[in-house]
Image (spheres, helix red, strand yellow):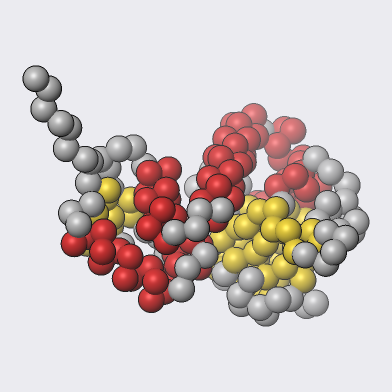
Amino acid sequence: MPTTSLSLADRQIFPDFFPEDLIAQARLRQLGRGEGLFKMGESVRHVIFVLQGQLKAVRTDPEGTECVMLRAGKGEFFAESSLITMSYACDGVAMKPTRVALLPVDAVQDAMASQGPFAGAMFGLIAAQARKQCSRQERLRLKKARDRIVHYLACETAPGQHVELKVPMKEWACELGLEPETLYRTLADLQSESCLERDGRRLRLVPRATEPTT
């Protein structure tokens, strides 16, 4: 598929610590919903950064059931293990119309080997994304919409603090595996029960009152 250079707006989505000379080497790739970015077994040539949309890494079991290994959205690297492997261990597929930046894997590896601060920042970011992936997979196993929302808010901030969503509510609903209507209804229920404070995309779980001791 053809690729193009990144716009200034695209470049600004990268983490602040990412070197400009690496970003300058990135190429833009656009994907439609359900379109594949790579196949299991293909040689790794790029480090993938999501500019818009959402990707999933999947395998298919012998019975034909799709198993989602991880997901990545705007501002996240995808299939980060590509930095240390020669081929992909899964299929990369767009869950919705998606735009990604493709960075030459050799260039990123060279920069990490020669620039200590950049390597440290990348390892820290990858570790944070790994934690987020674990929380995401655990959350999607929860059956109730309420439980998924509370789990997200509890995992993304310290008790009593606010979460400032960086994506529209419809995209958050997709992240939670919910229909937008279900998300809005459940948020309203949580507010009516005084379990949640909400101001637009700013949300906070209300700590439960402590029972008085006698």
Q: Can residue 135 be seen in this view?
A: yes
Q: Is residue 155 left or right of residue 84?
A: left
Q: Can residue 48 be seen in this view?
A: no
Q: Residue furthest front?
A: 214
**Residue 144 at x, y percent in the picture:** 44, 59
Q: Is residue 113 left or right of residue 138?
A: right
Quarter of the image with the C terminus in it? top left
Query: What residue is at 83 percent from the left and 53 percent from the top?
Result: 88
Q: Which of 57 and 106 is in front in this view?
A: 57
Query: What residue is at 67 percent from the left and 70 percent from the top?
Result: 94
Would you identify the image quadrant in which residue 116 lies?
top right
Would you identify the image quadrant in which residue 38 lies?
bottom right
**Residue 192 at x, y percent in the picture:** 18, 62
Query: What residue is at 38 percent from the left and 44 percent from the top?
Result: 154
Q: In this view, does 6 lie to the left or right of 211?
A: right
**Residue 115 at x, y percent in the picture:** 66, 33
Q: Nearer the viewer, residue 40 or 52?
A: 40
**Residue 136 at x, y percent in the picture:** 54, 51
Would you identify the image quadrant in which residue 184 lies?
bottom left
Query: What residue is at 47 percent from the left and 68 percent from the top?
Result: 178
Q: Which of 159 and 181 is in front in this view?
A: 181
Q: In this view, does 210 lie above or below 134?
A: above
Q: In this view, does 189 lie above or below 179?
A: above
Q: In this view, does 87 lie to the left or right of 99?
A: right
Q: How many marks?
A: 0
Q: Is residue 32 above or below residue 132?
A: below
Q: Nearer the viewer, residue 41 or 145?
A: 145
Quarter of the image with the N terminus in it? bottom right
